[in-house]
Image (spheres, rainbow, N blue to C red):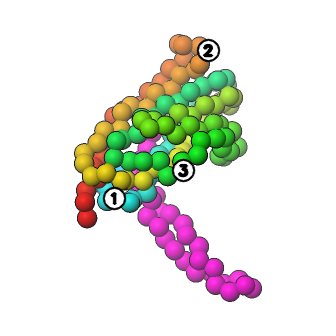
Amino acid sequence: KREYFKLVPQTTLRSSWRGPIKVRRYKRVPLREGASLDPGDLVEVRLTVDAKNDYSYLVFEDYKPAGLEAVELKSGYRLQHGLWYQLELRDRKAAIFVRRLAQGRQVLSYRLRASNPGHFNAMPHQAHAMYAPRVRANSTNLRLSVTTR
């Protein structure tokens, strides 16, 4: 399952022995079919995997909408919710490689930023096992638009 969330910044001030500290958190607002974004908006893409068995060597390919760019520019290994995976951010997609996926629900995520105005498609997300071609899954298409302010 793939979900898109608009990240709305919420800044608070906390006091500490050093003085005030600015804390920035984000509120996740779900984006539905046909949602509109402004240039510069942050978007979190969450991939939820419900694994019925333990799996090895999986690839998750998530095709990015053309008007959104990756926030992080550096690919590499990540640890999220106890799961190690390699995230490769490419021009057209984000590729996630998982060596071991335990049975149960796992969540993978990465962030994008709205950049170019227009109407865009997020093509279906695809997942498959590298060495077991019958193990496959995909998601649905999502339409988004980026409007000028």
Q: Relative to 139, say whether 131 is above or below.
A: above
Q: Secondary structure at mark 3?
A: loop
Q: Relative to 10, say whether 97 is above or below.
A: above
Label 1 vs 3, first from the N-terminus = 1
* Residue in the image at 59% along x and 41% along y: 75
Q: Secondary structure at mark 2?
A: loop
Label 2 vs 3, first from the N-terminus = 3
Residue 72: which disc? 3
Which amino acid, mark 2?
Answer: Tyr
Please say whether residue 16 is one of the residues in the magenta stretch.
Answer: yes
Please say whether residue 24 is one of the residues in the magenta stretch.
Answer: yes
Residue 131: which disc? 2
Residues 71 and 23: in front is 71
Q: Which residue is mark 1?
A: 39
Residue 120: quadrant of the picture = top left
For the record, the magenta segment spans 1-30
Which amino acid, mark 1?
Answer: Pro
Instruction: Tell me how far mark 1 sits from mark 3, CA to CA.
Output: 17 Å
For the question of whether residue 54 can be seen, the reply is: yes
The image position of residue 11, as x and y in percent, is 52, 74
Q: Residues within 10 Å of mark 2 (few under 14, many from 20)?
A: few
Q: Nearer the viewer, mark 2 or mark 1?
A: 1
The image position of residue 137, as x and y in percent, is 48, 24
Label 2 vs 1, first from the N-terminus = 1
